[in-house]
Image (spheres, rainbow, N blue to C red):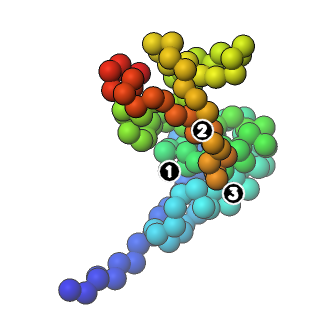
Amino acid sequence: MFHKEVFAYNAQVDCYKHGWALDFTVEADNIHDSQFFPVLLAKLEPFSPEFIIADSGYKTPSVAKFLLENWIIPVFPYTRPRGRRDFLRLKDFVYNEYSDCYLCLENQVLTYRTTTREGYRDIKAIPKFVRSISC
């Protein structure tokens, strides 16, 4: 089997609130939307936009940071949370300042184990206790 070559292009159009096209760019289709976002925004600078409404292809941390640094409010669509549903995040637990530890929903202490290479705090629970509760 051979891979079929496809020549496809992607047109990105900047529109005004009434649907009028202000500007556009045409790029290869295999480039992610967020990679040529600065080119689109440079063409919008004469209009000094206060808000940018974009689809989920532009919903990346780098695009959001770029917009906020330029005092433009990004408006992105809702996306479902990624990751496994059965994992709990650190914000799901209660921090006890007096003991400098985190507490489970059943007030059991979760001990700090180490900091990962990515800079996250690794918290460990007692395995036999975790099996018996829905924490």
Instruction: From the top left corner, tell me how far across and down residue 43 is, in percent.
Output: 71, 56
Residue in view at x 73 percent, y 56 percent: 42
Q: Residue at the location (34% across, 82% down)?
A: 5
Read off the residue under disc 1.
57
Disc number placed over residue 113 in the picture, else none:
2
Q: Residue furthest bottom?
A: 2
Q: Nearer the viewer, residue 118 or 83?
A: 118
Category of crowding for the residue at label 1, using alpha-carbon neighbours closer than 10 angstroms: few (below 14), some (14–19), many (at least 20): few
Q: Nearer the viewer, residue 102 or 11?
A: 102
The span from disc 3 to disc 1 (Cα, nearest Å) is 14 Å
Place residue 106 in its image quadrant.
top left
Left or right, 61 with reference to 31: right
Q: Which sits earlier in the primary sequence, circle 3 or circle 2?
A: 3
Q: Is residue 14 above or below residue 122?
A: below
Q: Which mark is residue 121?
A: none
| In the image: residue 2, left or right of residue 133 | left
Q: CA distance from mark 3 to mark 2?
A: 42 Å
Numbered circle sitting on residue 38: 3
What's the residue at 46%, 69% (across, down)? 30
**Up/down of 93 relative to 43, above or below:** above
- Tag 1 secondary structure: helix
- Estimate the spatial distance between the alpha carbons at disc 1 and disc 2, rounded to whole Å: 37 Å
| In the foreground, 108 or 116 | 108
Disc 2 is placed on an element classified as strand
Question: Which residue type carries mark 2?
Answer: Arg
Q: Amino acid at mark 3?
A: Pro
Is residue 73 rendered to the left or right of residue 25? right
Q: Quadrant of the N terminus?
A: bottom left
